[in-house]
Image (cartoon, helix red, strand yellow):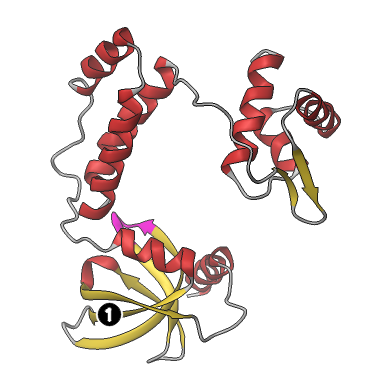
Amino acid sequence: MNRIDRLLAIAITLQSRKYTSAEALSERFGMSVRTVYRDLKALDEIGIPIGFESNKGYYVMQGYFLPPVMFSTEEANALVLVESIVERFTDKSIRRHYHSALNKVKAVLKHQQKEHVEHLEDKVVTSASCPNHNFEYLAEIQTSITTQTILQLHYQNAGQEVSLREMEPIGMVFYSMAWHVIGWCWLRNEYRDFKVARILKLQNTYKPFRKANHQHLNDYIKQQEMRMVLT
């Protein structure tokens, strides 16, 4: 990647996140932190207003937007490849949103790029043995996580028992070919792992979380992995 392309990529990265640290940019683009500082200064000098907040990182100041960016053929191809994964490993709600987003990407492609993408779409498939999730909860769960609002759900456990739960989701995990939502369960007063396929009904109450200082998802996963090692 030449420097011009790298500067544009850094600007897009900054605009896509609320804050980004110099260390994160260094790791992403494979360069020293010192070079990151030089690139950030160069962006500021060409008129892209870069802000910085202590202990959080750099950002593009509110109100500034980069002009629309054209996708390369390789980037469009990558999205097509992911489409086949989305089709098999997500639910109806995510598939609907992904297809809408992908169509917007296709709309800005050049004519020849569209031909390449259409050709590739016919050449990428997933095995019929992959799971096909027919529920429509993942998008609502994502909304609950980002807005920190309580979910109410009717959940059927492995013993076919159904219970009404209120839970505060801290994250989602895909393992054993299934989606799981991890969250604080007010019925059990502890963090629990809910298999999404066992949710019979789900509703976002839009009531704010009642529990403060939730455990980080990665810490929860590490604890569960440690329990498996010890058992």
Callout 1 amino acid: Leu
Residue sitting at 70 percent across and 36 percent down? 25
Residue 179 lies in quadrant: bottom left
Residue 157 part of the magenta segment: no
| x, y percent for residue 62 | 65, 46
Residue 186 lies in quadrant: bottom left
Of residue 209 and residue 64, the one placed in the foreground of this image is 64
Residues drawn in magenta = 174-179
Callout 1 secondary element: strand
Other residues around mark 1 within 10 Å, as few (<14) / some (14–19) / many (≥20):
some
Residue sitting at 28 percent across and 67 percent down? 196
Quadrant, the N terminus: top right
Residue sitting at 56 percent across and 66 percent down? 222
Q: How many labels does the image show?
A: 1
Q: Is residue 25 above or below residue 35?
A: below
Of residue 146 and residue 69, the one placed in the foreground of this image is 69
Give the residue at the far top of this rendering.
112
Indicate left or right for 145 with 179 as reference: right
Of residue 26 and residue 5, the one placed in the foreground of this image is 5
| x, y percent for residue 209 | 49, 81
Residue sitting at 39 percent across and 81 percent down? 167
Question: Which residue has dot 1 on it?
Answer: 153
Q: Is the magenta stretch mostly helix, strand or loop?
A: strand
Indicate left or right for 116 with 36 as reference: left
